Amino acid sequence: MKQSVSKAKPLPEISLKDVGGIHQEMKEEIMQTLSTLKDPKRSSDLGIQAPKGILLYGPPGTGKTLLAQAIAKELGSSFFSASGSAFNELFVGVGASRIRSLFQNARKQTPAVIFIDEVDALAGKRKPHGGEEGEKTLTELLVQLDGGHSNDGILFIAATNRRDMLDEAFLRPGRIDFSFHVQLPDRHGRKEIIDIHTRERSLAPDVQASLSQLAETTSGFSGADIHSLFETASRRAIRNGQKLITKEDLDFALDRTILGSSNQSLQDD
Ligand code: ATP
């Protein structure tokens, strides 16, 4: 069954501080964007247009969804989210009508953020012999994004791992005003993310003391990998009746994460 795309979703208690590894320059641009959106009157007096659409692009698990949620929370907005694939329908007109009702419902609950993950499934480059239905859905999205004043109070955020796949018309300023490249974190970024994900976990003193070293050894890890690492370590500690996460738990979780099997059952532990 397709997920409901046109209802506001509850947001977790989250702020921009919960998103680690964002480069300073991007952080500043996001802050500037937020202040424009928070006070559009003042911004327009200064000749700055509040953005209508933002694209977040980059590898999986780097925090694009998290960032969209944090932006919505900072703006005090309601949050409508869907995956691009939720609009791919074989039945004529269903995808387009889902887009319409998504925007209509968001307009009733402004300020609102509409977040579409995997937007390439919806706004991919049009192919000469591509499906007519997909084309109609994309056209409807463009129509809704061009809604002018009816979109006041709405921020559209799209995310993709494949920016190169997106239709040029979709990326046009006025529809997408800013694109942010959300990259895999560097060592400093990984340390920030490690700190975020250990804030509320009880660590043995030697684990606590080794977190900077961990940031070195987790080169290539995404934020989602780091999250999964500590989830796996915590689960092992709980399973063994411990109160603290030990070095053994962390080493076990590292092996699992590196093998890409951190979600496997712990039966063979
Ligand atoms: P995808 O492209 O696969 O949709 P994504 O970029 O949207 O992935 P998220 O879904 O936001 O990634 O990340 C999954 C989880 O990983 C988050 O809920 C969070 O726990 C953790 N995470 C990812 N990136 C970060 C980050 N930069 N800072 C803190 N936590 C992160």
Image (tube, rainbow, N blue to C red):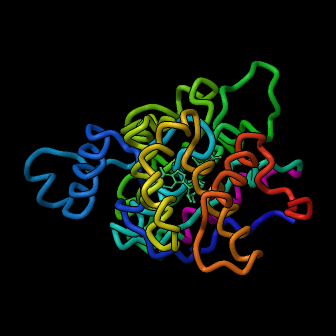
> Quick check: is 94 in the magenta stretch?
yes
Q: In the image as oriented, which residue stretches furthest toward the front?
A: 206
Q: Quadrant of residue 241?
A: bottom right
Identified at 82% across, 63% down, the residue is 2
Q: Quadrant of residue 105?
A: bottom right
In the rendered image, which quarter contains the C terminus? bottom right
- Residue 268: x and y in percent read 91, 59
From the image, give the main secondary structure of the stretch colored magenta.
helix
Above or below: residue 65 compared with residue 222:
below
Q: Quadrant of residue 263?
A: bottom right
> Quick check: is 76 in the magenta stretch?
no
Residue 235 in view of the camera: yes
Q: Is residue 113 left or right of residue 15?
A: right
- Residue 21: x and y in percent read 40, 45
Identified at 48% across, 42% down, the residue is 56
Identified at 67% across, 48% down, the residue is 254
Residue 150 in view of the camera: no
Q: Which residues are magenta?
A: 91-105
Identified at 24% across, 64% down, the residue is 38
- Residue 267: x and y in percent read 91, 64
Instruction: Decide which of 155, 215 is in the foreground and name it.
Output: 215
Q: How many marks?
A: 0
Above or below: residue 78 compared with residue 61:
below
In the rendered image, which quarter contains the N terminus? bottom right
Instruction: Decide which of 198, 11 is in the foreground and name it.
Output: 198
- Residue 32: x and y in percent read 22, 49
Instruction: Decide which of 73, 240 is in the foreground and name it.
Output: 240
Q: In the image as oriented, which residue stretches furthest toward the left?
A: 46
